[in-house]
Image (tube, rainbow, N blue to C red):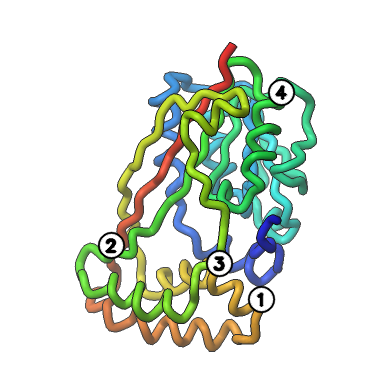
C-alpha cells in the first residue's frame, strides 16, 4: 500500500517550491561524468515535483518529459522550452516501450511502489538507457555548531516524526529482477548555506511537518513559529552551513 501523497496540497506544494535547496545541478554533473554522456536525446523526470530536478535535467537533454501525481506541485514547475509536464504516476508511466535514453528520479523513489516503478522504468528505457535515482539527505549537522544535531534529533524529530516510506535497498540483485544493472553508486557531500528563515522554510517543506499540518490539526503558523524559536539560537551569524549528502544510484538497461 502506497503512503498518502504528502505533496498534493496546494499549501504544502508552495512551501516545497520555496523551501527546498537547489542542489540538483551538482548531481547532474556527476551523472554526465559517470555515464560519459554530455547530452541525452530524450529524458524522463519521474516525481518531478515543483520542477527543480527537471530544470537541472533540461540543461543536458534535448527533450524532457516530466511527470508528477500532484497537480499542485506541477503548478509551481518552471516553463522551459524543451520540457513537457503531465500529471501521472511512477507506477503507470504513460509512454511507449523503449522511449527514453535517461530516466531521472529525485528524492521520490522512497514514495513509489518500487517494484512496479522499476518494472515500468525498464519497459520505457531504450537499450543502454540510464536510470538515475538520487536524493539529497540532510545529515542533521550544522558545520559551525555541533549542538544543532542533538536539537534536531531530540527535539524537532521527537515532535515531528518522519512518516513511514519504502526502504527496500537498491542492490545489484534487486535491480537485476527488472532487467537492470546497477552500474554504480556514490555519496556526494554538499554544503548548503542557509539563513534562519531559509532553514525554517526547509523544515516546513518536509513530510513530517506536512503530516502534522495538512493531515493533522496544527496550524502552519504555529509550527513555523515553534521551529523558528528552536533554530534561531544557533544563528549567531546570519548564515550557517548545513551539511547534506547526495545519495546517487546509476542503473543501466543492458543491450
Rounded to the nearest angstrom, the CA distance separating label 2 from label 3 is 26 Å
First reached walking from the N terminus: tag 2 or tag 1: 1
Q: Which residue is mark 4?
A: 99
Quick check: marks 4 and 2 in contact, CB under 8 Å?
A: no
Quick check: marks 2 and 1 in contact, CB under 8 Å?
A: no
Is residue 153 visible in this depiction of the protein? Answer: yes
Q: Secondary structure at mark 2?
A: strand
Position of residue 69 measured from the top left corner of the image (x, y, whole percent): 73, 52
Q: Which residue is mark 3?
A: 163
What residue do we see at 54% from left, 71% from top?
A: 208
Residue 76 vs residue 24: left or right?
right
What residue do we see at 72% from left, 56% from top?
A: 70
Position of residue 58 measured from the top left corner of the image (x, y, whole percent): 58, 35
Rounded to the nearest angstrom, the CA distance separating label 4 from label 2 is 41 Å
Please state which of the two labelled residues, at mark 2 or mark 1, is closer to the viewer.
1
For the residue carrying disc 1, how many other residues have a C-alpha within 10 Å: few (<14), some (14-19), or many (20+)? Answer: some
Q: Which mark is residue 214?
A: 1
Locate the C terminus and report the quarter of the image it occupies: top right
Rounded to the nearest angstrom, the CA distance separating label 3 from label 4 is 34 Å
Position of residue 77 measured from the top left corner of the image (x, y, whole percent): 65, 52
Q: Secondary structure at mark 4?
A: loop
Rounded to the nearest angstrom, the CA distance separating label 1 from label 3 is 13 Å
What residue do we see at 41% from left, 82% from top?
A: 228
First reached walking from the N terminus: tag 4 or tag 1: 4
Q: Which residue is mark 2?
A: 241
First reached walking from the N terminus: tag 4 or tag 2: 4
Residue 188 position by quadrant? top left
Position of residue 134 measured from the top left corner of the image (x, y, whole percent): 48, 42
In the displayed structure, would residue 149 be above or below residue 191? below
Amino acid at each position: 500500500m502506497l503512503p498518502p501523497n504528502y505533496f498534493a496540497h496546494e499549501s504544502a506544494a508552495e512551501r516545497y517550491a520555496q523551501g527546498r535547496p537547489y542542489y540538483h545541478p551538482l548531481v547532474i554533473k556527476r551523472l554526465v561524468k559517470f555515464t560519459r554522456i554530455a547530452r541525452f536525446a530524450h529524458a524522463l523526470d519521474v516525481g518531478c515535483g515543483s520542477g527543480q530536478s527537471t530544470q537541472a535535467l533540461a540543461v543536458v537533454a534535448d527533450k524532457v518529459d516530466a511527470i508528477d501525481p500532484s497537480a499542485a506541485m506541477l503548478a509551481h514547475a518552471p516553463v522551459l522550452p524543451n520540457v513537457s509536464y503531465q500529471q501521472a504516476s511512477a507506477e503507470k508511466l504513460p509512454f511507449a516501450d523503449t522511449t527514453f535514453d535517461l530516466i531521472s528520479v529525485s528524492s521520490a523513489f522512497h514514495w513509489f511502489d518500487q517494484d512496479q516503478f522499476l518494472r515500468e522504468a525498464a519497459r520505457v528505457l531504450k537499450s543502454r538507457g540510464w536510470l538515475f535515482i538520487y536524493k539529497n539527505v540532510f545529515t542533521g549537522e550544522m558545520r559551525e555548531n555541533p549542538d544543532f544535531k542533538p536539537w534536531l534529533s531530540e527535539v524537532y524529530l521527537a515532535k515531528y516524526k518522519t512518516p513511514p516510506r519504502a526502504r527496500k535497498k537498491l542492490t545489484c540483485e534487486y535491480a537485476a529482477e527488472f532487467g537492470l544493472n546497477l552500474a554504480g553508486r556514490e555519496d556526494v557531500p554538499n554544503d548548503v548555506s542557509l539563513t534562519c528563515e531559509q532553514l525554517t522554510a526547509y523544515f516546513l517543506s518536509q513530510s513530517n511537518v506536512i503530516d502534522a499540518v495538512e493531515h493533522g490539526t496544527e496550524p502552519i503558523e504555529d509550527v513555523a513559529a515553534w521551529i523558528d524559536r528552536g533554530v534561531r539560537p544557533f544563528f549567531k551569524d546570519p548564515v550557517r552551513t548545513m551539511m547534506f549528502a547526495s545519495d546517487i544510484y546509476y542503473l543501466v538497461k543492458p543491450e
